[in-house]
Structures are given as C-alpha cells and as structure tokens.
Amino acid sequence: MNNADLTIYTLFICNKFRKKIANLQFNNIKTMPKISNKGKLMPESPIRKLVPYSEIAKKKGHKVYHLNIGQPDIKTPEVAMEAVKNIDLTILEYSHSAGNESYRKKLAAYYTNQGIPVNIEDIIVTTGGSEALMFAMGSTMDQGDEIIIPEPFYANYNGFSTASGVNVIPVISTIDTGFALPAIADFEKLISAKTKAILICNPGNPTGYLYSKEEIMQLAALVKKHDLFLISDEVYREFTYDGDIHYSVMNVPGLEEHAIMIDSVSKRYSMCGARIGCIVSKNKELMTTAMKFAQARLSPPTIEQIASEAALDTPQSYFDEVISEYRERRDTLVEELNKIDGVIVSKPKGAFYCIAQLPIDNADAFAQWLLESYDLNGETVMVAPAAGFYSTPGMGLNQVRIAYVLKKEDLISAVRILKAAIPVYNAMQVKA
C-alpha cells in the first residue's frame, strides 16, 4: 500500500469512527424542547391551584365549602335559558367579529339606560371579560410597557400582563382603609415613560371596594395629565349595597379618548360559563385596533351571544332579589368572621368578595392544610390565598379572599370550620 492509499484508508477509518461516536452520543444524550420564558413566568391561579387538593378531600367523603371562586349559586335568568332551549339554527355560523349586530344594539341600549350613552360602534363583543382585557392591553401597550394597578387585584391581571409582555406596577391599598383608592401622589410617583395605562376593578375583585365618583374623577384628571388610558373592569356594576352608586369611567366628561370599559355577563346574570364580555370605548383609533385582534380570533361564541342578548330582557325584580340576597350574605359573612379572634375584615361595598386577614403565618399553607389534613365532622373549607392577588412580594401572606356566593347557612358553617381550624393549625406550627 503506497502513501496515497494509506492516507485514503486512514481517512475512511477516522470518518467511520466519528460517525459511530456521533451515533452513540445522539442515542445516549436526551434532549428536550424548551418551554418559553413567558410560559415559565405565567402565574398560577390562587383561585384554582388548590383544586387537586379539594378533589382529594371530596374523594375522602368530605364536604367542601367553596369560598375560593366567584361562581354564584344564583339561578341564571329564565329568559336566557329559554333562548338557548328554543334556538332554531340549521348552521352554527360565525358571528361578526365584533359580535352580533342585534346583540350590540341591545347592549348599547342597556348602557344608555344605565346612564352610559354609547353607540353600537363603541362596542366589541369578546369571549368573556378576559379577552376584552387582552384586547385592551394588546391595543394600548407594547412589549416592556407598564400598567399601574392598585393591589390587591384580580389575580388574572398578572396573567394577562405576562401574556402581553407588559409589566405590572402595583400601587398598594391596605385593609386598614378598606382598600380605598391609594393617594394620587402614590400613582404619580410610579408613572414613567413606559407607563401606558392605569387599570382598576370597580367594584373590586378581590376587595369588594366601590370607588366613589370623587375617586374616579381624581384618576380621570391624572390620566389626562399624563396622557394615559384608564381601563375600568366594571363586571360587578350592579352589585352595590347600602345605597352606594356605581360611577363608570364612561360617565366622565372629556375622558372619551382615555376611557376603556371592560364588561361581562358572567356575574351580572350568573352566566359564568357563557364566556361573553365586551370592550367599550369612544376612542375610535383604539376600537379600530381592537377590531384587528377580534378579527384574528374570528368571532365570539354564537350560542352564548344568543343567550346573552336574551338576558338583557331580565326584569329588574331579578336584580332586586339578587342584590338583597348578596347584601344579607355579606352581612352574615362579616358578622361571623368578626367572631374569630385576630381576624381583620373590611366590609365590602360591592361585588361579592372580601379580603380577610387571619391570625396565621401563611395562608397558602393553611389553605392546602384545610383540604389535605383537616375536617370538622366531615366538612372543610376551600379559600383563595390572597398573596396571589398581589404582585408585590411578601404582601397578603396571611390574607385570604372569600367569595360569599353560598347561601347564608353554608357561610355560617364555613366560618365555623375556619374558627375551629385556626388554633389547631397554629398549634401544629408551634410544634413544628
């Protein structure tokens, strides 16, 4: 074998060896596709993350009182249910991307009757209030922009912001003030070149606080001064108590270019499963932009729009009864909670939630323990740890959100379980 042949043979052997090594490495090294950083940052729902533990408790035969989620036990209006039963369709078609015209016309009339004069072109029907918020953020904010939100706030605002690439800048309200609007100076010092909007929930989830007209006017002046949007989640508009009046951002004169209202049928008509909401604004450029997002998802659900349109014919007597019932539930809950030593609770002015501060060190651990390890005569309670309703680390660790969507007898039983459970839990913590 001459030198040339030897060189060729050597190269052949080396190449064969490299392929063998490469195959061995490929076969032995396990690789995994990577999850997005955005996905990793998406927060868990404090409302739903304990569901597996409640399911285990139920499998043990325990009754679980669900104070964790705003799912009313109030019946959906008959007119809505009848509309679904009597649907006469041969094809389940797409609706208009902005929602059925007939529904939007009736919505505009409903808002006008509520003292909010809007037209059909000011409304885009969405898949729940959640999609309306996503449209609002997508239409007003870019990656890395900031939105200021009084906390504690509806936990999914964190999720919507993360999904939109928007940074939440919290301004803290406290249980000592009943979660009233923080001082405007506290908002102003947080405004930067990246701030695009202020978001409020009125009446509030999870606090039940109802912003006064004066507070809304203060926010209106602030967003006009700094050329920001004011996004108001008003899905609990009807649920106000003690003669207090809801004042919408859509009522503020001169705020037309700044105001964005978010709404939903979920709570108003006890139709959480319908997933129909809307975004409302008189800012034409904003609504044109939001329409692009609406077109991208094609259309809101057809059957649910039919039910929601029919629900607008719900008689006032329905709301009178519902509000009276919730007022009694609120009073019962607050009265019972105040019987527990060390509990601090502010009386909600609206919606059907309250934040209670418990004499414990960690509400997350306590809520899980209630489901995993505790029962009183075969019954236990599921609450939502309030830390998930804050974005400031360390806030709300000993607080829970309670939804008073159960009948009064069940609320009394649930609080009785909490009262018995707290000293047992604290004794275990001392031993540990």
Image: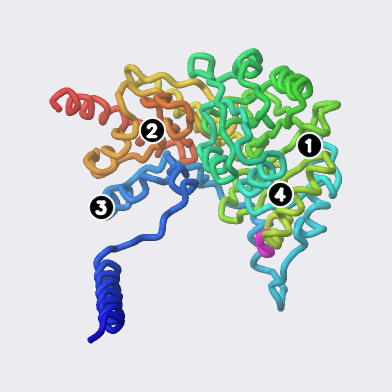
The circle on residue 61 is: 3
Specify the segment rendered in magenta.
300-304
Residue on which disc 4 sits: 314
Q: Is residue 336 visible?
A: no
Residue on which disc 2 sits: 412
Residue at figure coordinates x 72%, y 44% from the top left: 139
Q: Provide residue 278's location: percent of width, then percent of height.
A: 71, 48
Residue at figure coordinates x 38%, y 33% from the top left: 412
Label 3 residue SS: loop
Which image quarter: residue 144?
A: top right
Q: Nearer the viewer, residue 355 or 243?
A: 355
Q: Dot 2, how many residues are within 10 Å of its Cα: few (below 14), some (14-19), or many (20+)?
A: some
Of the numbered discs 3 and 2, the one sitting upstream in the chain is 3
Q: How is this picture coloured?
A: rainbow
Residue at figure coordinates x 27%, y 63% from the top left: 29
Is label 3 or label 4 in front? 3
Residue at figure coordinates x 64%, y 67% from the top left: 85
Q: Is residue 68 visible?
A: yes
Q: Nearer the viewer, residue 165 or 68?
A: 165
